[in-house]
Image (cartoon, rainbow, N blue to C red):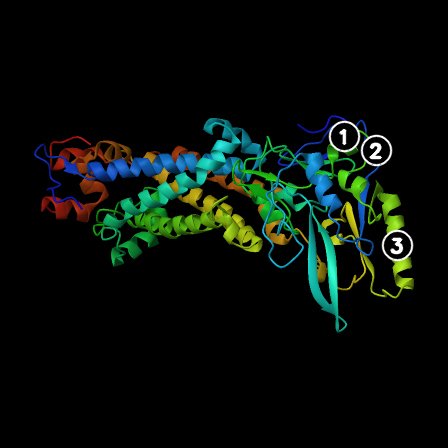
Amino acid sequence: MALDTQDIRARSATPSSFPSARSFQPEVSKLIDLSRCIGCKACQSACMEWNNLRDLVGNFDGSYTNPPDLNDQSWTVMKFHETEIDGHFAWLIMKDGCLHCAEPGCLKACPSPGAIVQYQNGIVDFQQDQCIGCGYCIAGCPFNIPRLRREDSRVYKCTLCSDRVGVGLEPACIKACPTQALSFGSRAEMLLQAEHRLTDLQERGFTQAAVYNPAGVGGTHVLFVLPHGDRPEAYGLPRDPRIGPLLALWRSTLARSLGVLTMFSVLVAGVLHYMRYGPLEVPEEESGKKDEAKP
Amino acid sequence: MSSRDPLLPDGRILRHDNRERIVHWTVAIAFIFLFLSGLAMFSPFFFWLSLLFGGGQLMRLLHPFCGVALAVLFSAYAWPLRRDNRWTDADSDWVRSMFRYMRKEANELAGTGKYNAGQKLMYWSMVPIIAILFLTGVVMWQPYFAPAFPAALRRVAGLLHAATAFVMFVGIGVHWYAAYWTKGSVRAMVRGTVSQAWARFHYPRWYRDVTGKDP
């Protein structure tokens, strides 16, 4: 059940319009300034606490990243990337999770009506009671975010705390961040703040710093300030994420119409042929000619 | 292949033995299940069909298992028929006069054996179609196999699976219509036997092989 306090902009597998009485609500965004992140994982803990999740205590595998990846119990995970930039070792800390695309590939891919909704404020939310577990959203996501829970065949991911935002609170991760690496507010405010942070960073010598707000998915409602903005891959972010032509074609109205047209054509061709030529029967003289048995 | 003499004591000819008929109709039931549930997942316009299968979750769970069943059953159906479906020169002639045959301006050719060229085309098109549907289906199968394949491959598989399914629908649609159009063939697949006149008219060479009489 989608939140009643939020109007819906898009709903999976639902080709119609939606109630928009509250469409005046501004779009929201989360800003993640990775230059300020100290990797304390307060956001990761707050996420589990608010969403009432119970992930396993994992194993140490040579990195602070724990659990090793997103899963159905951890909707945000701090990733610690070790890389080399300009000949120097760089330890890049990245808060991984859903980016809440303006044009979400998951929603486009989903075949179950209402299993994925996008609210007017830009949050993309999964409705697990409607989820059929096909995993199309996973194939459709350019960021590899949704996770299928084997035990119940439902897909989970960050909700941007739609339940908190819907009643005027900020997401749990924002609340927990001790360094103001995380901010939340209207999209316009956050874009402006990102520009300010960018100026600061550039003055400090991060000449390649950039805001990550990829146009290929219409922009995202989770914005990153990347100190090494010329190398998004170093943070585990795709350089130019897109839904891609294959998914777009597969889940398009064109393909669906072609499918229906194909079925309809076979039916019409059959009816017309039968009307014009009639059934193919064994001629009577043939039946009586050489043997006694009837057809 | 049945070792029984297809010419029965009552003068009728056995065209499809018990095993063949049972497997054929099981494949048919599996196809209908797969097509309706696949359609529900392909287009939101048809999602209501999921109610026929106990809701979206159960439908999604059953679809791939049913797909494996169809692939296995179809293999069991098709393998014994491979010799009867071997392509001959007479079949190439049949294809050339196909439209005249469809307009009922030409009778079945003297060289037509147990299956005519149209049926053989159906047979040989279903082999790759079902193979493609099976393989692309495995690539998309959650939660067992899909995680082993990259997302890009799963997108290709999804598109190919849907496109091939519609090609299959056209094939099966033609098959259904041809069975309805050719009076006596549904009965043959239900009851198993045909009259000698029917065999002689539709499948002259098969009639000759079975009865030893000239058509």
Image position, residue A164 (x, y; %) = 77, 32
Task: Give the left or right position of residue A12, taking residue B78 as reference.
Answer: right
Which residue extends farthest bottom?
A87
Residue type, numbered disc 2: Gln
Marks 1 and 2: CB-CB under 8 Å?
A: yes
Task: Give the left or right position of residue A142, taking residue A149 as reference.
Answer: right
* Residue A267, quarter of picture: top left
Residue type, numbered disc 1: Gln
Task: Give the left or right position of residue A264, taking residue A295 as reference.
Answer: right
Q: Which residue is mark 1?
A: A6
Q: Residue at the spot x=52%, y=37% of the render?
A: A151
- Residues packed near mark 2 inside 10 Å, few (<14), some (14 to 19) or many (20 plus): some
Give whichever of discs 1 and 2 has the lower sequence position: 1
Image quarter of the C terminus of chain B: top left
Q: Which residue is mark 3?
A: A197
Give SS at disc 1: loop
Image position, residue A242 (x, y; %) = 68, 53
Rendered image: mark on residue A25: 2
Chain ID at mark 3: A
Q: Residue at the spot x=19%, y=35% of the render?
A: B194
Image position, residue A122 (x, y; %) = 76, 39
Give the CA separation, mark 1 to mark 3.
30 Å
Chain ID at mark 1: A
The number of discs equals: 3
